[in-house]
Image (spheres, grey):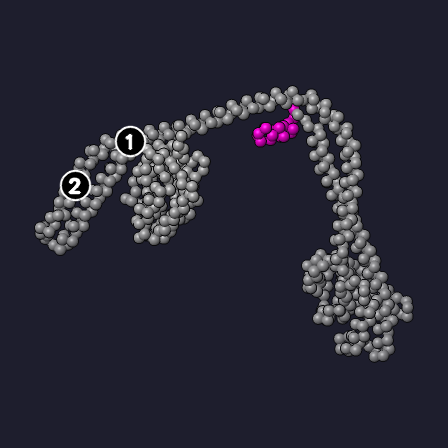
């Protein structure tokens, strides 16, 4: 069974006539199970995340209450009794004592940082010494404002690589919590007298691990439950599917036969239409070439003789310049230039007439077996010498398998020479022309790629029309590519052109059929 038949048979299950209930049920169930499992996992994970944060906040509340009590019991009360005041900024002994008490009470509690603020929002103690004295302006930290102004504890979960309120980047997840600090009278807390705010950072690095584990358990449990339900319903759906398939098999078979006939007929119509279009193009081109050929044959003979006379007279005058006497020096300088111009332009006109005659004449072709690599190499060697003065590099890349075609060597050499010359003319200063050959099972491609001026998009479809040229006036007749097109068409080949626009160079590709000896 071919790939086409397999794909057709597979996709036919989606047609309305052949309702494949088992497939639809399986796909729908899979999608529903996946969505429900994902949603349930997300909901449970979010709930678990909130619970973990609440437990962390509750745990932090206990720690802060203990630290609050210890600060008054072991530091504030003894310090005031000893010194009569508390001055952490100027009294290093007091600061060292406070630092020792706090660190001994938070040791092993998985805290990443601790800050003690006074009621003005200034940090009077921190385990990061450079932050001491730092002031957070009101409004810059919502949680701190709640703790300072209203005595309400507040927390915020910070993602990794995010700056905290002090501008420090924390690499792991952490819970930033603010708790009010109250005055103690003996062992009794006086919540009417707030003296500051304690900020702590709890390490939440394991949060994602716990959430992933919870999400995975939720997905497995949900998927397992729905999978059992799926299997139970599958048995019922299977019976219904067998009945539906039995009733629709004949309709599907008839439909497939009809589709094959319609597809074959459509393919035939498409191929016929394409052949008709190609024939119309060839006919139009042939009519245009025939008209031009008739015009050229009729006009060329009428023009050639006068041009020959003008050229002969000009050449005779040039030969007699030494015997002529001129009235002024200006005449002596200008007269030879005029004669040269007449002589050169006359022969240029004769060259154009000659090309028109070549264009119109039906020259018999001499076909033989040709090695394309050898022919291309000869042309490149010959034309390459002409491009040296322009600093144009002609690069050659030949196929490793020498391709052979059946054709007229002189005509093909004319075509290749024309393409390389055009490419050289398109390169104004320095550049490169890459000529390459590649072959496949039934054809050989000869590619001419240059780094020259390129072709405007609106001119791509005109390059093979007779008398169309993008060269400057007087530098091209516009017949070269038209002649090349006719030669390649006679060889049963094709020519394609590609250019990305002005300034991006041009690529011409000739495709000729491989010669197979029988």
- Looking at the rendered image, the disc whose residue lies closer to the viewer, 1 or 2, is 1
Neighbours of disc 1 within 10 Å: few (<14), some (14-19), many (20+):
few
Identify the residue position indicated by label 1 in the image. 364
- At 35% from the left and 37% from the top, the residue drawn is 370
**Badge 2 element:** helix
Q: Is residue 419 magenta?
A: no
Question: Where does residue 373 sit, x and y in percent of width and height?
Answer: 37, 42
Question: Where does residue 420 sit, x and y in percent of width and height?
Answer: 34, 44
Q: Is residue 343 left or right of residue 292?
A: left
Closer-to-camera residue (360/9): 9
The disc, 1 or 2, on the residue closer to the chain's N-terminal end is 2
* Residue farthest toward the right in the current orientation of the protein: 187
Residue 149 visible (yes or no): no
- At 22% from the left and 34% from the top, the residue drawn is 300
Quadrant in which the N terminus is drawn = top right
Question: Where does residue 203 sit, x and y in percent of width and height?
Answer: 76, 60
Closer-to-camera residue (473/266): 266
């Amino acid at each position: 069974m071919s790939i086409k038949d397999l794909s057709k048979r597979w996709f036919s299950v989606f047609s309305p006539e052949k309702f494949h209930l088992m497939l639809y049920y399986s796909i729908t169930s899979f999608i529903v199970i996946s969505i429900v499992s994902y949603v349930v996992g997300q909901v449970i994970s979010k709930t678990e995340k909130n619970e973990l944060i609440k437990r962390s906040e509750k745990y932090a509340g206990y720690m802060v209450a203990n630290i609050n009590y210890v600060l008054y019991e072991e530091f504030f009360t003894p310090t005031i009794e000893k010194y009569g005041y508390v001055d952490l900024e100027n009294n290093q002994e007091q600061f060292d004592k406070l630092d020792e008490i706090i660190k001994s009470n938070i040791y092993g509690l998985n805290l990443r940082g601790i800050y003690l603020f006074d009621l003005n929002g200034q940090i009077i103690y921190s385990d990061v010494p450079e932050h001491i004295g730092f002031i957070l302006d009101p409004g810059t930290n919502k949680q701190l404002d709640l703790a300072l102004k209203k005595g309400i504890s507040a927390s915020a979960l910070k993602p990794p690589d995010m700056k905290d309120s002090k501008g420090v980047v924390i690499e792991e997840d952490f819970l930033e919590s603010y708790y009010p600090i109250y005055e103690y009278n003996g062992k009794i807390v006086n919540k009417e007298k707030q003296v500051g705010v304690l900020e702590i950072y709890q390490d939440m690095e394991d949060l994602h691990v716990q959430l992933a584990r919870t999400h995975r358990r939720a997905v497995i449990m949900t998927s397992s439950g729905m999978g059992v339900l799926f299997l139970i319903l599958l048995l019922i759906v299977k019976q219904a599917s067998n009945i539906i398939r039995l009733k629709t098999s004949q309709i599907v078979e008839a439909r497939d036969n009809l589709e094959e006939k319609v597809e074959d007929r459509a393919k035939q119509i498409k191929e016929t239409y394409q052949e008709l279009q190609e024939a119309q193009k060839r006919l139009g081109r042939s009519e245009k070439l025939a008209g031009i050929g008739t015009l050229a044959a009729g006009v060329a003979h009428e023009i050639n003789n006068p041009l020959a006379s003008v050229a002969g007279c000009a050449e005779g005058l040039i030969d007699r310049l030494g015997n002529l006497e001129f009235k002024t020096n200006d005449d002596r300088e200008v007269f030879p230039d005029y004669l040269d111009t007449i002589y050169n332009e006359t022969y240029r006109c004769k060259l154009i007439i000659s090309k028109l005659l070549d264009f119109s004449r039906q020259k018999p072709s001499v076909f033989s077996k040709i090695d394309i690599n050898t022919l291309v190499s000869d042309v490149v060697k010959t034309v390459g010498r002409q491009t040296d003065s322009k600093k144009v590099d002609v690069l050659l890349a030949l196929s490793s398998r020498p391709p052979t075609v059946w054709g007229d060597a002189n005509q093909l050499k004319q075509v290749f020479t024309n393409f390389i010359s055009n490419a050289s003319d398109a390169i104004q200063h320095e550049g490169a022309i890459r000529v390459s050959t590649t072959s496949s099972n039934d054809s050989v491609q000869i590619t001419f790629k240059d780094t020259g001026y390129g072709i405007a998009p609106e001119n791509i479809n005109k390059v093979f029309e007779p008398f169309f040229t993008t060269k400057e006036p007087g530098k091209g007749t516009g017949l070269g590519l038209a002649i090349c097109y006719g030669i390649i068409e006679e060889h049963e080949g094709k020519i394609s052109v590609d250019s990305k626009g002005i300034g991006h160079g041009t690529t011409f590709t000739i495709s000729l059929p491989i010669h197979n000896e029988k």
